[in-house]
Image (spheres, rainbow, N blue to C red):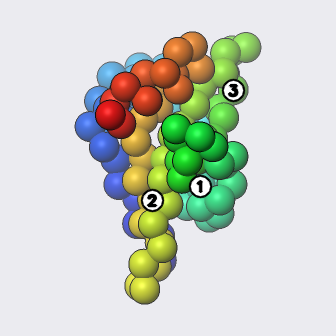
Amino acid sequence: MVQLFFLPPAEKYFKKLRDKELKQKYKTALEAICDDPFAGSEKTGDLSGIFGYDVYHNRTNYEIAYRVYKLTDGSKIVVIMAGTRENFWNTLKRYIK
């Protein structure tokens, strides 16, 4: 069983999201991540251990950054941040530090 948790930046972003079509694409992406926690691409270097999942909407690239924890009773997925691709990874690095 996979548990899904949201950190404050991700929760705030999803709460403010008004575009229903984009919201649905994020929901589909999160379901895909729950089905296969390693569906996203694993980052290296400063962001080692963090996965990124791409969502495309209206010719814009959006990202979901998450971390997977393996527990004895199942996996735990923590969504760290979500948003547009522009400066996304730099903002995530600042948030992590």
Q: Are marks 1 and 3 in contact (CB under 8 Å)?
A: no
* Residue 52, percent from left and from top: 60, 41
Residue 29 in sight: no
Separation of marks 2 and 1 at Cα, in angstroms: 8 Å
Q: Which residue is mark 3?
A: 56
Asked if residue 87 is positioned above or below residue 96 in the image, the reply reads: above
Please state which of residues 25 and 1 is positioned toward the viewer in this rendering.
1
Residue occupying image coordinates x 66% and y 35%: 54
Tell me the SS state at disc 1: helix
Residue placed at 37% from the left, 25% from the top?
94
Q: Residue at x 52, y 38 (%)?
A: 46
Q: Which residue is mark 1?
A: 33
Residue type highlighted by circle 3: Tyr
Position of residue 23 measured from the top left corner of the image (x, y, whole percent): 50, 32
Q: Amino acid at mark 2?
A: Ile
Q: Is residue 16 visible?
A: yes
- Please give left or right for residue 15 compared with residue 64 in the image: left
Tell me residue 56's x, y (percent). 69, 26
Q: Residue 77 shows which numbered tag?
A: 2
In this view, 79 is above or below 77: above
